[in-house]
Image: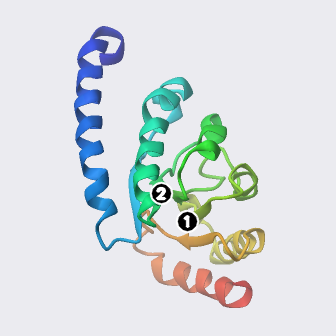
Amino acid sequence: MEWAERRDEVLKLYHALADRQRRIFPIIARSPALAVNYGGNETPEVMGPPRFREYVIPLYNEAAEVLHRHGKLLGAHLDGNNRAWAQDIAKSGLDYIEAFTPAPDTDMSLREALDAWPDKVLWINFPSSVHLSPVDEVERTAAELIGTAPKDRFIMGITEDIPEDRWQENLLAISRAINQGG
């Protein structure tokens, strides 16, 4: 609604925030950090690919240019549906996608993401909905993800909450899959 009714005001805020972020890029680049998460959590259903291309990708690329000159890696937290802008992400300066969540929770499988982004590391979020499944399905899903992933650009993590009554058995099941196939 704000975009439709007060676009000029929204763009003033965007430009002020973007200018502030541009001043921060060199500070981070000179820091001891090895990798930097920047932005993320964009949603194509709300933002749409044209605005993502116009307002987000250029800042990713500016950050990447500054950070790469100092040997830093750049990633973004992209845990939602990414199919609509997968090609834009592929062409971006991002080195890794943090919290990528594969289907069934989003619109891209791990295989589709690996194929779409062959030069990026995928630091995935184990699909949250699977934590509600029987333990053997949790283990099978973990094994399938590990079996699909290359060994040189895949990290499996959990970025969302696991149900309180399931975390121990689910983490053990995921650990078994890692020990057997990882």
Given the image, on which type of amino acid does mark 2 rest? Gly
In which quadrant is the N terminus drawn? top left
Any mark on residue 32, and which?
none
Q: Position of residue 67 (x, y in %)?
A: 41, 58
Q: Position of residue 7 (x, y in %)?
A: 31, 14
Any mark on residue 75, and which?
2
Extreme residue toward the top, this view: 5
Which is nearer the eye, 156 or 10? 10
Q: Residue at x 52, y 27 (%)?
A: 48
Any mark on residue 123, and which?
1
Q: Residue at x 56, y 58 (%)?
A: 129
Which is nearer the eye, 139 or 151? 151
Callout 2 touching callout 1 (CB < 8 Å): yes
Given the image, on which type of amino acid does mark 1 rest? Trp
Image: 108 above or below 158: above
Nearer the observer: mark 2 or 1; the answer is: 2
Dot 1: element = strand
Tell me the crowding category of disc 2: few under 14, some 14 to 19, or many 20 or more residues within 10 angstroms, Cα based: many
In which quadrant is the C terminus drawn? bottom right
Q: Residue at x 30, y 36 (%)?
A: 18
Which is nearer the eye, 11 or 105? 11
Structural distance between the alpha carbons of marks 2 and 1: 9 Å
Q: Which numbered disc, 2 or 1, marks the residue that appears first in the sequence? A: 2
Q: Position of residue 35 (x, y in %)?
A: 42, 67
Q: Quadrant of residue 95?
A: bottom right
Q: Is residue 165 left or right of residue 92?
A: left
Q: Residue at x 26, y 36 (%)?
A: 19
Q: Quadrant of residue 159?
A: bottom left
